[in-house]
């Protein structure tokens, strides 16, 4: 059961071999066993899950099932979910029960997919290790002494441990792709604007994008069919014709031009990761692809640019957390201003405060041109590099992260060292391009290695085609972490 | 560029985050490391480059000027720290 693909689960449901309630219960049982050692879920509510599954069973019985009706899914705790605790991994929202559904949640509900619960994450999605969560770090299912990556670390870990067949994530600088890589699953960040941000708690609005996380590219294609679509409630939602992202999965790769950015294979890349990515390139060549060397010369500036733009947007977005309308309020204060300052000092964690302060500074009087405007100009240069590259290739390939998972606590005292984890993922966010990560091997410690694909705008179907064909020829995405099933402890 | 503890306290004040002297000193070093990283941007010649604010060149949509929201103040205020007579309560700001 726990290793079935989404299409296999849907087929079992359609054939009435299992009901949605039974399926949900099986996953809830597995969560009860494994979650205490992984900490992937913040909130579970079996009654709600099973009630949603009963609705799905009624749809199936009435012959009104869609492609994934009855298949359960886990949602990142960044999505407002009506009646569910929605914390964004923060003390600031530790008591916030959302009074409405995010657009993404609405779509999965409409598709008849019951929610298994809300997954752990770095606080306000600010982190690359899941260690900044107010609810404790998530552990990597491949080795619980290691981080799962972040910020969608709970989502990646729950899928890797098969506590859920799929999960939602969000990606501002790599928060879907990097944890997908570190946990050995497949994750896709769509073109900016394809998935509505309505009800998704904002971090950096010009970069935030939700996407699917699941074992395989085929699963992600099915989930993307559910998630994408115009939403008038998001001013940046794009009005486009509906696509079927599974349409090109079975296309052969002959003639595919794979661009290899030399900057992504330079100093700083772990040797084992480089070897695994090289082997993946060789596999794609066997499938008929050709390679072309490209340059993304300004990509080395992506981290400094990102650490101006994202904190600037965050400092504005997070100003709404003031202890007045929702969430945490400091217990003692002398006046309104003191209430704001104490509420925010006590309600936000160290990393979130650090980024708000960076943002407040780069936007402050006298510094705007030197920081914010300069960063926006370099953002253009980075996007232009991609446009030039896509004149000579169909998809760009490289590592997702410079290394594999690191030990819990290893980088938590050094913010810059932590930020460098997103070296290869941030450029796609700045340009607004789709990017995905898929498993392509393991290091000597048995930790997964991620392969990144970046496509041109709206080329998700092509990227999923490449990933699916690679996954037909390899079995990295089918490997399972060595979890002690009975005790929930690592073997 | 190097921030002093007083700079850090000024930034925290802008961000409405209470910070004491010890925290300001601890934060100072980490912010300076991050701003050293950010400073690598300054070497890039960007004259003539148009700033990119957004990934997609789209303009704001307009909609018909009609009421689309229902009154859900009870649900929205149910999650507020302090409410009385349908009003959010905050410390007195006008003497």
Image (spheres, coloured by chain):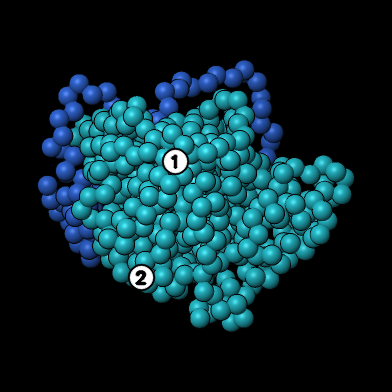
Q: What is the quadrant of residue A420 in the picture?
A: bottom left
Q: Residue at x 31, y 69 (%)?
A: A410
Judge whether residue A387 can be spotted in this image.
no
Q: Which residue is drawn at 22% across and 50% down?
A: A266
Secondary structure type for disc 2: loop
Reply above or below: A268 against A161.
above
Chain that the image shows in blue: B
> Does residue A177 appear left or right of residue B48 in this picture?
right
- Give the mark nearest the N terminus, 1 or 2: 1
Which numbered tag is attached to residue A288?
A: 1
Mark 1: few/some/many CA within 10 Å (<14, 14-19, 20+): some
Reply above or below: A395 against A145.
above
Colour displayed for chain A in the image of the structure: cyan
Q: Position of residue A32 (x, y in %)?
A: 64, 72
Rendered-image quadrant of the N terminus of chain A = bottom right
Judge whether residue A466 can be spotted in this image.
yes
Do discs 1 and 2 belong to a common subunit? yes
Reply above or below: B94 against A193.
below
């Amino acid at each position: 059961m726990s290793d079935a693909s989404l299409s296999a689960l849907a087929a079992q449901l359609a054939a009435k071999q299992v009901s949605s309630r039974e399926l949900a219960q099986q996953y809830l049982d597995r969560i009860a066993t494994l979650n205490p050692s992984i900490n992937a879920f913040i909130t579970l509510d079996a009654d709600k899950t099973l009630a949603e599954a009963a609705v799905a069973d009624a749809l199936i019985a009435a012959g009104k099932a869609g492609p994934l009706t009855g298949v359960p899914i886990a949602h990142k705790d960044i999505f407002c979910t009506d009646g569910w605790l929605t914390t964004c991994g923060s003390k600031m929202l530790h008591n916030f029960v959302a009074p409405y559904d995010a657009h993404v949640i609405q779509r999965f509900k409409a598709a008849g997919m019951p929610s298994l619960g809300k997954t752990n994450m770095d606080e306000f999605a600010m982190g690359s290790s899941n260690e900044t969560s107010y609810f404790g770090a998530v552990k990597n299912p491949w080795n619980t002494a290691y981080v799962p990556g972040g910020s969608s670390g709970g989502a990646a870990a729950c899928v890797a441990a098969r506590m859920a067949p799929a999960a939602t994530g969000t990606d501002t600088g790599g928060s879907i792709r990097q944890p997908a890589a570190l946990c050995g699953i497949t994750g896709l960040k769509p073109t900016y604007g394809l998935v509505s941000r309505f009800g998704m708690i904002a971090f950096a609005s010009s970069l935030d994008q939700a996407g699917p996380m699941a074992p395989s590219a085929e699963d992600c294609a099915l989930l993307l069919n559910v998630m994408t679509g115009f939403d008038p409630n998001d001013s940046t939602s794009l009005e486009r014709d509906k696509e079927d992202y599974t349409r090109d999965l079975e296309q052969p790769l002959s003639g595919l031009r794979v661009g290899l950015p030399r900057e992504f294979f330079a100093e700083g890349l772990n040797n084992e990761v480089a070897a695994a990515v090289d082997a993946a390139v060789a596999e794609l060549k066997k499938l008929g692809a050709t390679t072309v060397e490209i340059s993304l010369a300004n990509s080395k500036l992506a981290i400094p640019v990102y650490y101006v733009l994202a904190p600037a947007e965050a400092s504005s977005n997070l100003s709404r957390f003031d202890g007045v309308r929702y969430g945490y309020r400091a217990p003692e204060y002398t006046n309104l201003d003191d209430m704001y300052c104490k509420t925010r000092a006590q309600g936000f964690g160290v990393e979130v405060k650090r980024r708000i302060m960076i943002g407040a500074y780069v936007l402050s009087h006298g510094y705007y041109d030197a920081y914010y405007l300069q960063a926006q100009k370099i953002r253009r240069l980075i996007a232009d590099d991609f446009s030039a590259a896509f004149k000579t290739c169909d998809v760009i390939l490289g590592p997702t992260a410079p290394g594999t998972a690191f030990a819990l606590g290893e980088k938590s005292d050094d913010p810059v060292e932590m930020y460098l984890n997103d070296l290869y993922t941030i450029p796609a966010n700045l340009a607004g391009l789709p990017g995905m990560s898929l498993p392509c091997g393991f290091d000597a410690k048995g930790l997964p290695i991620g392969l990144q694909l970046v496509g041109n705008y709206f080329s998700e179907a092509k990227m999923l085609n490449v990933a699916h064909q690679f996954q037909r020829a390899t079995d990295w995405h089918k490997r399972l972490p060595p979890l002690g099933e009975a005790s929930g402890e690592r073997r | 560029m190097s921030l002093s503890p007083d700079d850090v306290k000024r930034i925290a004040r802008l961000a409405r985050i209470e910070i004491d002297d010890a925290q300001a000193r601890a934060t100072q070093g980490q912010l300076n490391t991050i701003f050293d990283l950010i400073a690598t941007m300054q070497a890039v010649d960007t004259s003539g480059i148009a700033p990119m604010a957004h990934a997609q060149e789209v303009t704001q949509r307009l909609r018909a000027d009609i009421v689309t929201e229902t009154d859900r103040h009870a649900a929205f205020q149910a999650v507020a720290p302090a409410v009385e007579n349908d009003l959010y309560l905050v410390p007195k700001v006008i003497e």
